[in-house]
Amino acid sequence: MDLGAIAFYVVAAVSLIAALGVVLTRNVVYSALLLILSLSLTGLVYLLLLADFLALVQILIYGGTVSVLLLFALMLTRPQESATLNRGGWPIGAIGAILLFGALAYGTLTTDWGAAATATAGGGRTASLPAPVRVSIDQLGESLFTTWAVPFEIASLVLLVALIGALQVARSAEGPREGAR
């Protein structure tokens, strides 16, 4: 096993541990900080897989911007005696996580990774798959703003609605203001 594979497995394992810490930690602030760590380590996994642009987007957008918005939302809400997460749905979440892990493990273990370069075409004949192509940032940007413009805008609207909803929940948790009736 070469050094790149060892680094990949170490970073992936630490990212998995940080992701588990996000859902298992009772303190909301620690959970948010572990989320930042997990998202940043996912960007490092992309970097180890030589997906430079994806790593940059993962670290800057998810590891930075979304996590900072989450921390601002935590700071803007009025702290109660102890800000803890609700643990009512953990059995369903644990069952879902185990089922997802089983499906991913089954798919990984039953895939013939050595024969990934060939595929069976119609009629039982074997055809070669096209070789992977490195896409330039210009091509990626053009595709993002032509083919994928609508899904990109829908994702931004979902994030905007989530932010407005979080602000509304934080505002309603404060109770009525003194001047309002």
Image (cartoon, rainbow, N blue to C red):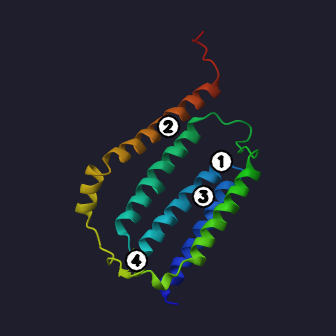
Amino acid at dot 3: Leu
Which mark is on residue 123?
4
Q: Is residue 60 above or below residue 179?
A: below
Q: Which residue is found at the position 57% from the left and 12% from the top? A: 179
Q: Is residue 50 above or below residue 151?
A: below
Q: Which percent across, then down, holds residue 88?
A: 76, 44
Which mark is on residue 163?
2
State left or right for residue 139 relative to residue 127. Answer: left
State left or right for residue 135 relative to residue 64. Answer: left
Q: Which residue is found at the position 46% from the left and 84% from the top? A: 115
First reached walking from the N terminus: tag 2 or tag 3: 3
Amino acid at dot 1: Val
Amino acid at dot 4: Gly
Residue with the mark numbered 1: 28
Q: Quadrant of residue 74?
A: top right
First reached walking from the N terminus: tag 2 or tag 1: 1
Query: Which mark is in front, 2 or 4?
Result: 4
* Secondary structure beneath label 1: helix
Gap between marks 4 and 1 measured at Cα: 56 Å
| Crowd tier of the residue under label 2, counting other residues whose Cα lies within 10 Å: few below 14, some 14–19, many 20 or above | some
Along the viewing direction, whichever of 169 and 128 lies nearer the viewer? 128
Amino acid at dot 2: Leu
Residue with the mark numbered 3: 34
Gap between marks 2 and 4 measured at Cα: 52 Å
Q: Which percent across, then down, holds residue 18?
A: 62, 63
First reached walking from the N terminus: tag 3 or tag 1: 1
First reached walking from the N terminus: tag 2 or tag 4: 4
First reached walking from the N terminus: tag 3 or tag 4: 3
Gap between marks 2 and 1 measured at Cα: 17 Å
Furthest residue to the front?
123
* Secondary structure beneath label 2: helix
